[in-house]
Image: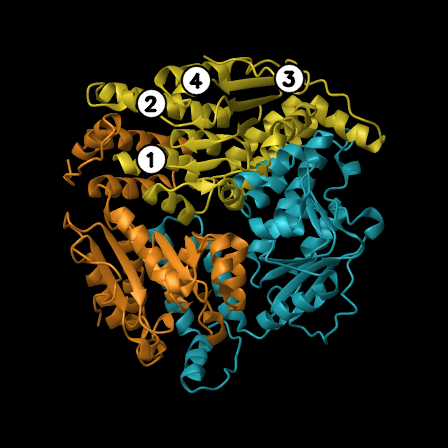
Chain colours: A orange, B cyan, C yellow
Amino acid sequence: MWDALKDQGSPLDASFLNIVLSNPEKRNALSLAMLKSLRSDILRDAESNDLKVIIISAEGPVFSSGHDLKELTEEQGRDYHAEVFHTCAEVMMLIRNHPVPVIAMVNGLATAAGCQLVASCDIAVASDKSSFTTPGVNIGLFCSTPGVALARAVPRKVALEMLFTGEPISAQEALLHGLLSKVVPEAQLQEETMRIARKIASLSRPVVSLGKATFYKQLPQDLEMAYYLTSQAMVDNLALRDGQEGIRAFLQKRKPTWSHEAA
Amino acid sequence: MWDALKDQGSPLDASFLNIVLSNPEKRNALSLAMLKSLRSDILRDAESNDLKVIIISAEGPVFSSGHDLKELTEEQGRDYHAEVFHTCAEVMMLIRNHPVPVIAMVNGLATAAGCQLVASCDIAVASDKSSFTTPGVNIGLFCSTPGVALARAVPRKVALEMLFTGEPISAQEALLHGLLSKVVPEAQLQEETMRIARKIASLSRPVVSLGKATFYKQLPQDLEMAYYLTSQAMVDNLALRDGQEGIRAFLQKRKPTWSHEAA
Amino acid sequence: MWDALKDQGSPLDASFLNIVLSNPEKRNALSLAMLKSLRSDILRDAESNDLKVIIISAEGPVFSSGHDLKELTEEQGRDYHAEVFHTCAEVMMLIRNHPVPVIAMVNGLATAAGCQLVASCDIAVASDKSSFTTPGVNIGLFCSTPGVALARAVPRKVALEMLFTGEPISAQEALLHGLLSKVVPEAQLQEETMRIARKIASLSRPVVSLGKATFYKQLPQDLEMAYYLTSQAMVDNLALRDGQEGIRAFLQKRKPTWSHEAA
């Protein structure tokens, strides 16, 4: 169901994992099959030292329309519904717990769980024609799970208005409120996304991994515990081979050579 | 003390509860009597299946000037002071815990506990001439309780500057920082507020109620617990009569007919 | 290492404590010595009733370049590294726990722990030529400790993009996202900072202190506990001599005269 991005505008190697939502006829609905595929794609190469960054993009004018509503009928039953939402939550948490940064590249409408997917990525770049909406309330299914990711990205009143009215916000509004990292014209979307991805791919994988894990770990803590955890992480980072190489290279005014070794 | 909004520009029915701060000579100060009246107004019809949305607005050029300072003198005494703040906090928490969304419609200055009231609503629409301030520090009474609602709506540095300097922010700044959901010219304030209210009134009450309660429940949780709670809520939502009707209507390409039944 | 700000544009008295990072040849690097000096400067006069506000500024075109990388080499060793980060965290927490507001006045680049210092102040005013960056990842040392302060000031996606790419944001972007309280042209930086500082210095010290402490105390709590703590603080504030004087003066339409007495 997922193909590697073909025309990347730049040679790709094992540093990049491109995950493409490629079911545009179904508006890239996040069916259970699609979610399982996404889960295994995200997990693919997670432990490879070569992998530096993941990019999630989509074919067609809709990034993703969210859950497949045919899977949420009464006939499918409660257990099936539970599996859908459980798998979806698992995908979102895998993104956060993944050792490398995950970038969403959005070119079009992201709806409900599709909006949740964008909000769950570490970085999100969108074309200026993109828009974002959590319209479940219109069809009697409040976007409570998308709300988890949304509420952690934007101010409360922005999230609540989106959730209660189901109305879309533009890419510019999404940028303003923190749902997106960057908005560019459609023609520059791939270039800008790849610029960020290449930058991340040029860094030391264990340094970035430790940094990402530490960031999310300290986030819910009080200030004292957050500083305890991160001060420890800084010391551990300096003890990494790449931590020492980086400081040394800086003081010697040369480019660092990363080993990407985990210790 | 509170009158129903008279000239609503649209026929009102039991779906809407209009609460109007209507003591403009006193700048709609939140005296203890006013707070108790507000509390009973908010509780009125809370359990009625007809009620879909609450709108809080105000008469006169000041939305609300906050607590009545005559009630906070030394002569009134500590117990009276405690009752004022306790009742105020109760009102703010009732708004959050209410089964239907509460919209603030602001046309003018909202000060101290008045600003807190706006920040505590789920949605806030304001005219562009409105402004917001927490000036207690000027008269030796730091706006600590308003700061609770403010700090949960805007970035920390915005809240702290407002609290430490007592200076007002404009409606546009309030929108930018997340205190407001929408800013419109004064002439369109009622129309825009009612547009949002009517939209919410057209939805299924038990779906919106479950969504609102779930949103605030997941908000302080870590990601795993938040997804656990909300995945459960999604399954429960689908089991609601209106959840099933909504999905069915969508797949059958017709408008849903809500029963508003709680199960 | 620290000199009092000389050309303040206004007479200064014991109300103001100016802490100036004054090692511009080293880009005001936060060496361990600098951090210890900063710590003792921040603690100086903390208990004096005269002190009303602290302003942290810097000499030269760089506000601060962050840690001194010469102190983070392998040769310095793990214990030394730990002391550096521990002392740095201590400084940041002292700012938050200080009885008076701390204002950062930024005119230039604030990097890594320098950016953390700005984010940790209660209020931050910057010239429009200033910029902010957490570029540790470029030299193999992820800005995990700066990320603590950054993540509590700006939306998550803004923080992560800064941390993962190491790219700077402008003063305007920093303002938009909540890292700064105000941005002004360079020529007005001192005037605007002093305007805010003088405003704070004109207030009652115990009222402001109680307000600041209460604000940070309620911030991580759930709504009910936050209102419990702050309602109590409001009652305590009213029992302060300056709390009573402030209300009385307001009702008597005269300027209050603060005693600055702690009870």
Distance from Cα at disc 2 to Cα at disc 1: 14 Å
Q: Are marks 3 and 2 on the same chain?
A: yes
Using the image, name the chain to which the residue with label 1 belongs.
C
Numbered badge on residue B132: none
Using the image, name the chain to which the residue with label 2 belongs.
C
Q: Are marks 1 and 3 in contact (CB under 8 Å)?
A: no
Residue A168 located left or right of residue B181: left
Residue, disc 3: C15
- Quarter of the figure with residue C237: top right
Q: Nearer the viewer, mark 2 or mark 1?
A: 2
Q: Secondary structure at mark 3?
A: loop
Closer to the camera, B117 or B92? Answer: B117
The disc labelled 4 sits on which kind of residue?
Asn
Q: Are marks 3 and 2 in contact (CB under 8 Å)?
A: no
Residue, disc 2: C68
Residue, disc 1: C143
Q: Nearer the viewer, mark 3 or mark 4?
A: 4
The residue sitting at 72% across, 76% down in the picture is B11
The spot of residue C142 in percent (x, y) is 30, 36
Q: Are marks 4 and 1 in contact (CB under 8 Å)?
A: no
